[in-house]
Image (cartoon, coloured by chain):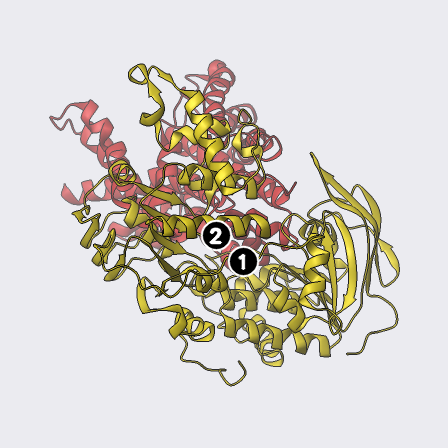
């Protein structure tokens, strides 16, 4: 590792507050050319805010940014690019309807007014060869996998001559072997003197790839240390300032009871909707007292799977049984009344009403239970009691019940949805990324709840991108690819790497590097 | 007789299709940048009345067309200010703009009702206009007719071959992404709505200066709304809009011919014909065109903070 004597980029006293939260509190930080600098911290620690200030999305309340020692004003992404700063966002902001070349051309400011497609394509190919970022320039972006889209994002920045590259959670939704490929690309960039900033909360990856690690906690920098000197323990204590509860261990190797499966799908297929994907011949059973984990890169039919179980989407072919009854044509209400809880992928979009109060949201999933006088009034006392009990059981803090749900943080909304769905001892739980957006403590609590429900006899369908979570919780694992279940296995019979290859449909190229 | 009918329907299709094409192009580029403008009807009316009044006052129809285009563009800037700067709802503002245009044009045009003008005259293309059938159908039209298809081609070229067009489409698909790429979505949307207003004004001018040669209240009779349907029919593509405009122009022309020839069908039913066609188009195209819709159509770019 060679670090140039003068920092390429410096933050001095950067402060930024949002209503009710101080996101950045006098941040001082230096970034050098030729280093991979990891910015580590749990959700809400302020790392993304700091980088968005650097990229001109937010304006700092105070402090200054220096590029090559010169103070600069960055008011918009345009200014940031003028300082040769580039950012790969967590949710890529490519335009699906346009081709790779068009997306890249959009980003380049030095192109002539009349676009010369061939010239753009050859520029792309030049750079993509140098840094092993192969993509098809003429392909529309909606056809690309997540890993390929990330390559396009990086190509964009490199072609636009950025020297400081910021990557926000770059390994989210990448398969394990794609992560290895990404780190290889980052190493090549470091060799050529780029400054690479990786924002992440995944400790293992930080230790693998970073030259220096800066840990943020509650808007402040807890410490900066050399990657070679850091250990998982020091990082954890810096991130949380206290010991973290251990992740719950999977129950002993007791095989699932051979009872009637609570959920059974037989040859279920659906019509693809819009740019979505259709399910193809899904066969899946979930027995009481077992957690079936579904792994897959997002967008390979997991959402549709949950929708079919809940009857939000109809089966085009095949049958669905719930508790031994043919439930293929049941309405959503019937499915829910049979004791099905649903923790969706996107709580605000699918399960919550941001402008209704917390308690109204709580009552919404089961209005008839709380209705009094034939629906003319509601028993709010019972709603509050149930919600309180459920929150307590989950070990979550109790927020005010009268505020609109939408003003809570993402993690708190997810907690409320969990509490609501778990309140009435469901017999079947469909959980999409149940710990997304939760801090480590709450995630551990949520996982414990799932395990406790399972031990109490609930059937659980767990859909997640977090392979570690799937491995630690599931009794059986299913892998989805393009709307099909391509493999099922017990966790002990398969490795994370194998799952990764199955998820991406690749036949194990690059396995020797892994 | 039947050849004469065919020629007159053809002429009618081209004549009626021309303002539709300008209007459809106006709406197409607007929607490509993410803005659905139901006020097009109002813009056309303002274009029609201003073009007519200026032509009456100056006796110069070319000046009338230019004035109509500018008036349409300026009128559309009201809409632009509301939906871009004030971030107001596009549908509500569009409808308000339409009714505002109906009223304002009636006010401006009231003293001029009944005035006849020469307006835009047919320009005969030498040699071609003497061809037996095609000569009358295709080569004896006014200047705006001849310019309509080239305008569509130019807009296609700008949209798909230039950096400006790429940025514009990007804003329509995802303004946040375009912003992150260093573009200014607000500026692009203002530019596009100005041009969209120019085209809408020209569409109106063709109605009053070339088709009717006079001014009547609400003379657009829903053509602005046809154009909105035509954009869907053309799948947001300027070249497909040519075929769509001819088809709808043909429907309007057929209806007029049938009425003129006293076909024994209630005139109310005949009046409905073009509208039924546009409903049919929406029914058929309604679901299949999903992939062609600009991703962020109708949504307001909220900035980043």
Q: Looking at the image, which is closer to me, B198 or A349?
A: A349
Q: Secondary structure at mark 1?
A: loop
Left or right: B219 as drawn, with respect to A175: left
User: Which x, y percent locates residue B285?
Assistant: 29, 45
Chain drawn in yellow: A
Q: Examine the image and state in which quarter residue A337 appears.
A: top left
Identify which residue, B13 or A66, lies in the foreground.
A66
Which residue shows up at 28% across the image and 39% down it? Answer: A332
Residue lying at the far bottom of the rendered structure? A512
**Residue A447 numbered tag:** 2
Disc 2, SS = helix
Question: Which residue lies under the disc numbered 1?
Answer: A247
Query: Can residue B236 be seen here?
Result: no
Quarter where residue B114 is shown? top left
Q: CA distance from mark 2 to mark 1?
A: 8 Å
Q: Earlier in the sequence, mark 2 or mark 1?
A: 1
- Please tell me which residue lies in front, B204 or A22: A22
User: In terms of image quadrants, where is residue A423?
Assistant: top left
């Amino acid at each position: 590792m060679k670090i140039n004597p003068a920092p390429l980029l410096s933050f001095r006293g950067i402060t930024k507050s949002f209503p009710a939260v101080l996101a950045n509190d006098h941040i001082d930080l230096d970034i050098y050319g030729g280093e991979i600098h990891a910015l580590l911290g749990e959700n809400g620690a302020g790392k993304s805010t700091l980088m968005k200030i650097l990229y001109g999305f937010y304006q700092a309340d105070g402090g200054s940014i220096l590029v090559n020692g010169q103070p600069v004003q960055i008011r918009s992404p345009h200014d940031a690019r003028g300082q040769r700063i580039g950012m790969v966002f967590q949710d890529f902001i490519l335009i699906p309807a346009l081709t790779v070349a068009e997306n890249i051309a959009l980003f380049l400011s030095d192109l002539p007014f009349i676009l010369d497609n061939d010239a753009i394509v050859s520029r792309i190919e030049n750079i993509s060869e140098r840094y092993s970022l192969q993509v098809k320039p003429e392909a529309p972006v909606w056809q690309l996998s997540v890993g390929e889209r990330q390559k396009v994002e990086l190509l964009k920045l490199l072609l636009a001559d950025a020297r400081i590259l910021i990557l926000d959670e770059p390994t989210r939704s990448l398969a394990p072997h794609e992560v290895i490929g990404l780190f290889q690309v980052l190493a090549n960039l470091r060799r050529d003197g780029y400054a690479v900033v990786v924002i992440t909360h995944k400790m293992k990856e930080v230790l693998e790839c970073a030259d220096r690690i800066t840990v943020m906690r509650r808007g402040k920098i807890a410490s900066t240390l050399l990657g070679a000197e850091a250990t998982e323990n020091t990082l954890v204590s810096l991130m949380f300032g206290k010991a973290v509860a251990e992740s719950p261990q999977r129950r002993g190797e007791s095989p699932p009871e051979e009872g009637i499966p609570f959920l059974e799908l037989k040859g279920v297929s659906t019509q693809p909707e819009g740019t979505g994907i259709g399910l193809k011949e899904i066969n899946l059973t979930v027995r009481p007292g077992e957690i079936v984990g579904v792994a897959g890169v997002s967008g390979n039919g997991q959402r549709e799977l949950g929708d079919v179980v809940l009857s939000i989407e109809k089966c085009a072919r095949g049958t669905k049984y719930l508790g031994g009854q043919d439930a293929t044509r049941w309405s959503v209400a019937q499915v829910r009344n049979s004791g099905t809880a649903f923790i969706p992928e996107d709580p605000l979009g699918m399960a919550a009403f941001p402008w209704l109060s917390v308690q109204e949201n709580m009552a919404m999933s089961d209005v008839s239970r709380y209705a009094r006088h034939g629906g003319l009034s509601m028993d709010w006392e019972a709603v509050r009691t149930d919600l309180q009990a459920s929150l307590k059981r989950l070990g979550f803090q109790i927020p005010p019940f009268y505020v609109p749900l939408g003003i809570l943080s993402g993690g708190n909304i997810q907690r409320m949805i969990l509490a609501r769905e778990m309140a009435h001892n469901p017999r079947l739980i469909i959980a999409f990324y149940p710990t997304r957006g939760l801090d480590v403590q709450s995630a551990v609590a949520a996982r414990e709840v799932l395990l406790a429900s399972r031990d109490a006899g609930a059937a659980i369908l767990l859909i997640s991108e977090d392979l570690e979570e799937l491995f630690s919780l599931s009794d059986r694992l299913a892998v989805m690819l393009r709307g099909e279940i391509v493999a099922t296995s017990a966790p002990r019979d398969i490795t994370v790497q194998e799952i990764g290859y199955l998820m991406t449909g690749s036949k194990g190229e690059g396995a020797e590097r892994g | 007789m039947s050849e004469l009918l065919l020629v007159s329907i053809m002429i009618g299709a081209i004549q009626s299709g021309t303002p539709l094409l300008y209007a459809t192009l106006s709406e197409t580029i607007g929607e490509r940048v993410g803005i659905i403008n139901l006020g097009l009807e109002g813009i056309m009316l303002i274009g029609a009345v201003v073009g007519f009044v200026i032509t009456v006052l100056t006796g110069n129809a070319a000046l009338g067309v230019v004035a109509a285009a500018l008036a349409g563009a300026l009128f559309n800037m009201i809409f632009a200010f509301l939906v871009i700067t004030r971030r107001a709802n596009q549908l509500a503002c569009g409808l308000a703009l339409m009714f505002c245009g109906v009223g304002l044009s009636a006010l401006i045009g009231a003293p001029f009702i009944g005035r006849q003008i020469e307006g835009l005259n047919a320009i005969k293309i030498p040699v071609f206009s003497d061809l037996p059938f095609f000569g009358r159908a295709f080569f004896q039209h006014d200047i705006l007719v001849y310019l309509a298809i080239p305008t569509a081609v130019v807009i296609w070229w700008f949209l798909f071959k230039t950096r400006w067009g790429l940025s514009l489409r990007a804003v329509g698909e995802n303004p946040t992404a375009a912003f992150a790429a260093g573009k200014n979505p607000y500026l692009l949307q203002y530019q596009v709505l100005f041009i969209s207003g120019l085209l809408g004004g020209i569409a109106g001018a063709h109605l009053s200066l070339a088709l009717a040669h006079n001014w009547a209240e609400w003379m657009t009779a829903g053509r602005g709304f046809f154009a909105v349907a035509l954009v869907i029919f053309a799948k947001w593509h300027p070249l497909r809009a040519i075929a769509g405009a001819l088809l709808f122009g043909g429907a309007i022309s057929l209806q007029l011919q049938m009425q003129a020839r006293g076909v024994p069908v209630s005139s109310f039913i005949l009046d409905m014909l073009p509208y039924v066609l546009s409903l049919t188009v929406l029914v058929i195209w309604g679901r299949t065109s999903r992939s062609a819709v600009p991703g962020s159509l109708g949504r307001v770019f909220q900035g980043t903070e």
